[in-house]
Image: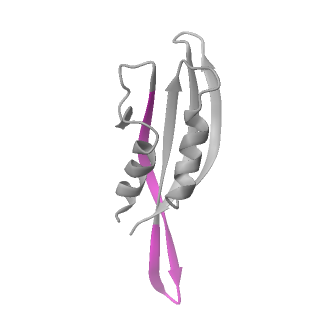
Amino acid sequence: MKWYEKIIAAHLAVTEQVSHCERMQSDRYFVWQEDGRNDLSADNFHVNTVVTGTTDLFTKTEFDPWVEELEKSFGENGISFLMNSIQYEEETGFHHFEWRWEVLNG
């Protein structure tokens, strides 16, 4: 399975309200985007690549269950992650959660 198929599957296990790179016109949705990679070398050979990225949840639901559901889905799909930030955007009324993730390429 390709790295992006794992990322897409992890999000779709929670909801179909998910987009790659672009905000959606909704009160509750995920946006994910790749932003780099880490390469692993051993004995002067390239061994593997990990793709890095972020997922943002924009929600107007306080204590949104999608937070726990996405983290569970990341674990079930072999995706390493950490919660990077939690913010409340007063001008839009959105709770904004951001995760950083890493997934093997291949």
Colour scheme of the rendered structure: one colour
Secondary structure mostly seen in magenta is strand
**Which residue is nearer to you in this view: 47 or 3?**
3
Q: Position of residue 73 (x, y in %)?
A: 52, 50
Q: Position of residue 97 (x, y in %)?
A: 58, 32
For residue 41: magenta? yes
In the displayed image of the protein, which residue is found farthest to the top? 91
**Which residue is nearer to you in this view: 59 or 54?**
59
**Which residue is nearer to you in this view: 48 or 60?**
60
Q: Position of residue 27 (x, y in %)?
A: 45, 18
For residue 31: magenta? yes
Q: Position of residue 81 (x, y in %)?
A: 59, 52
Residue at horizontal 56 percent and vertical 41 percent from the top: 69
Query: Is the residue 35 above or below the residue 61 in the image?
Result: below
Query: Is the residue 6 above or below the residue 83 in the image?
Result: below
Residue at horizontal 35 percent and vertical 56 percent from the top: 5
Residue at horizontal 38 percent and vertical 49 percent from the top: 8
Q: Which quadrant of the figure has residue 63?
A: top right
Residue range corresponding to the magenta coloring: 29-49
Q: Quadrant of the N terminus?
A: bottom left
Query: Is the residue 28 above or below the residue 11 in the image?
Result: above
Q: Is residue 12 left or right of residue 75?
A: left
Query: Is the residue 40 above or below the residue 31 in the image?
Result: below
Residue at horizontal 45 percent and vertical 69 percent from the top: 49
Q: Quadrant of the C terminus?
A: bottom left
